[in-house]
Amino acid sequence: MALTSWAFIYTADGADPAGVVTDVDNGTCRSVFVGVPDVPSGIALAAALVDDGAQLIELCGGFGPIGTAQVLEAIRHRIPVGSVGYGPESVDGVHDLFS
């Protein structure tokens, strides 16, 4: 099976809780980017992305391992879910951005 549709959920202050959606379709693969104000909003939207055809969901680092597990539960483990992580070489820079 080829990957033809995937989604990336990210948190962005001020985003609509219903999600700010950017849909990119190159004719071979559809990429859906969804900005939400917080992790609970992303968890709530994940099942709709699966129902809409997403075969894979990637999450921004703000979800962390607990939010990632909550997304997997919300979608009943129907598709793979991964999350971005930052190594120790980036921790100070990430802290500076979000503190």
Image: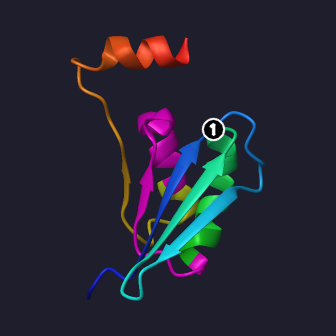
The residue positioned 77% from the left and 49% from the top of the image is 17
Decide: is 63 above or below 16. above
In the foreground, 96 or 64:
96
Colouring chosen for the image of the structure: rainbow
* Residue on which disc 1 sits: 12
Task: Count the marks.
Answer: 1
Q: Name the amino acid, label 1.
A: Ala
User: Range of the magenta residues?
Assistant: 51-71
| Relative vertical location of residue 46 with respect to residue 87 in this rendering, above or below | below
Image x and y of residue 68, in percent: 46, 46
Dividing the image into 4 quarters, which one contains the C terminus?
A: top right
Q: Which residue is drawn at the image coordinates 37% and 16% (left, top)?
A: 93
Q: 77 or 20, which is in the foreground? A: 20
Residue drawn at the location 50% of the way across and 34% of the way down: 62
> Please, which residue is most extreme toward the front here?
26
**On the rendered image, what quadrant is the N terminus found in?**
bottom left
Please tell me which residue is depicted at 67% across the width and 47% down the height of the picture.
36
Residue 11, magenta (yes or no): no
Q: Secondary structure at mark 1?
A: loop
Q: Let me know if residue 56 is in the magenta part.
A: yes
Q: Quadrant of residue 34?
A: bottom right
**Percent position (x, y) of residue 80?**
36, 64
> Dot 1 surroundings within 10 Å: few (below 14), some, or many (20 or more)?
some
Q: Quadrant of residue 21?
A: bottom right
Instruction: Give the percent coordinates (x, y) of residue 27.
Output: 41, 88
